[in-house]
Amino acid sequence: MKYANLGHTGLRVSRICLGCMSYGTPKWRPWVLDEEAAQPFFRRAVELGVTFFDTANMYSDGVSEEVTGRALRKYAKLDEVVLATKVYFPTGSGQNERGLSRKAITQACEASLKRLGVDTIDLYQIHRMDPNTPIEETLSALDQLVRQGKVRYLGASSAYAWQFMRALSVSERNGWARFVSMQNHYNLVYREEEREMLPLCEAEGVGVIPWSPLARGLLAGSRKSLDDKEATTRAGSDTLSPMLYNQPGDWDVVEAVKQVAEARKAPPAQVALAWLLSKPVVTAPIIGATKPEHLEDAVKAVSLKLTPEEVKALEAPYKPHAVRGL
């Protein structure tokens, strides 16, 4: 495993982040592994040198945080682990069990700490921007968590570049803790983040930790077409994928990945992840693993170096998209 600083911070993380949305309870999503089935993935991740783990308070209605916390306390040395979670989406039916008001953030953080079984969250991220709460209220509440020692670093996810820049500016003007990471939608099939968000993150020293680095499994090479719903359990029940990846040109990108992978004698997933890791602004893609090879391929991708010709071949079929994933 290789490691890098998260943006311009001194926080060191593994170049692969294990996304823990896949672990919790299948009552939430049919493809989610329960705690017993998830244990081997945490154990193997630690054995492979993975130190970066990402979850959210809404995954499996909080069960993901519970499973993640217990597994890391069992298999990992917590002083070496970077544990990330998120806040924004509803966790109950109440009006203050959602969003990014001071009350919602404070309550959500306390609940996440309890479920994770830790005293401090290493990276606390807003899952989306909240249009119903002044950004000053959100940022001051997050800064207070840092000052109280409940959170070490702050991150954001899936915003317009202007929104993110405004947030960075407001925090800087007020002397508040700034966002150090951006968890955004970025992969070979969806590259619109290259227009504004990625240059912004590079200029501001913000680490990028993309979600859906394999385009919800499309770039793993298991599907036969964009609308193939039989390849995996997740594909059969995934209502978001058809909205994110539905352009005819998207499949041309998948075919390009397969061609490079075949020539390299490597799985398509390794090639797609190696492409992401070749981008200097990307710190660590967030990968989901529900089969052993998912985790093994992700870790091997860290050492896979693509040639300029291979990168050109992978990027050539791309066609511009409308903004998606916000």
Image (cartoon, helix red, strand yellow):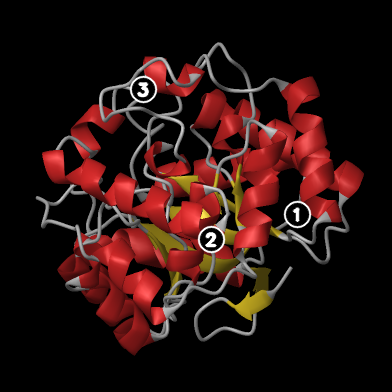
Separation (CA) of disc 3 from disc 2: 30 Å
Residue 87, compared with residue 264, is above or below; it is above
Q: Amino acid at mark 2?
A: Arg
Residue 231: quarter of image: top left
Q: Is label 1 or label 3 in front? A: 3
Q: Residue at x 20, y 32 (%)?
A: 243
- Residue 25 image point, x, y percent: 62, 18
* Left or right side of 215 for 295: right
In the rendered structure, which disc, 2 or 1, sits on the residue that comes first in sequence? 1
Q: Residue at x 44, y 81 (%)?
A: 280
- Residue 121 image point, x, y percent: 65, 57
Residue 137, compared with residue 147, is above or below; it is above
The reply to whether residue 115 is visible in this rendering is no
Q: Residues within 10 Å of mark 1 (few under 14, many from 20)?
A: few
Q: Considering the image in quadrants, where does the N terminus appear?
A: bottom right
Q: Residue at x 83, y 65 (%)?
A: 79
- Residue 146 image point, x, y percent: 57, 68
Disc 3 designates what residue? 238
The numbered mark at residue 119 is 1
Residue sitting nearer the eye, 279 or 89: 279
Residue sitting nearer the eye, 41 or 189: 189
Q: Secondary structure at mark 2?
A: helix
Residue most toward the front?
A: 263
In the rendered structure, which disc, 3 or 2, sits on the residue that comes first in sequence? 3
Residue sitting nearer the eye, 249 or 282: 249
In the rendered structure, which disc, 1 or 3, sits on the residue that comes first in sequence? 1
Q: Is label 2 or label 1 in front? A: 2
Disc 2 designates what residue? 264
Separation (CA) of disc 2 from disc 1: 45 Å
